[in-house]
Image: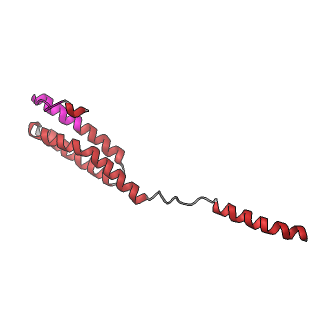
Amino acid sequence: MDQTRRLLPLAALAAAGAASLAPRPAAACDAEAMEAHLTAVCDGALEPARQALAAAMEHATAEERMAMQRALTIANNTCTTGDPVAGARIAANLARLAGRIEGRAGVQSLTLDLLG
């Protein structure tokens, strides 16, 4: 019985320690904050594509304008609905399309210093 009395507090201490080690959500993992940040990153990737499209729009055909608007709408939706990778991929493709349209029209880049 003496031995049981000595082990009981140790067992209670071990159980309390194990309970404190149980997995629980980390305080730093705020899903809404992470989603907002990913949306901001996606929008950041999309903004240069928007600017390039605006510059290329006057040189685009009607079919290209419709395709650009449709792709831009899809990119905006993917950024806001939680797929920033798809939004950034579409942004890169839109920027490439804008570059092709401007290249075809003979529009020269203002400067290459912007590339870094």
The image quadrant of residue 94 is: top left
Please report the residue visible at 84 percent of the width from the left and 68 percent of the height from the top: 6
Please report the residue visible at 75 percent of the width from the left and 67 percent of the height from the top: 12
Task: Please give left or right for residue 59 compared with residue 87 in the image.
Answer: left
Q: In this view, does 11 lie above or below 98?
A: below
Q: Is residue 39 above or below residue 19?
A: above
Which secondary structure dominates the residues rendered in magenta? helix
Q: Start and end of the magenta stretch?
A: 95-111
Across and down, in percent, residue 45 comes to 28, 44
Across and down, in percent, residue 56 comes to 13, 38
Picture mark count: 0
Task: Please give left or right for residue 46 compared with residue 101 in the image.
Answer: right
Please report the residue visible at 38 percent of the width from the left and 55 percent of the height from the top: 35
From the viewer's side, name the closer residue of 68 and 47: 47
Q: In this view, does 48 lie above or below 111?
A: below
From the viewer's side, name the closer residue of 41 and 103: 41
Answer whether residue 99 is magenta in the image.
yes
Answer whether residue 61 is magenta in the image.
no
Q: Is residue 5 above or below residue 20?
A: below
Task: Please give left or right for residue 114 compared with residue 14 in the image.
Answer: left
The image quadrant of residue 36 is: bottom left
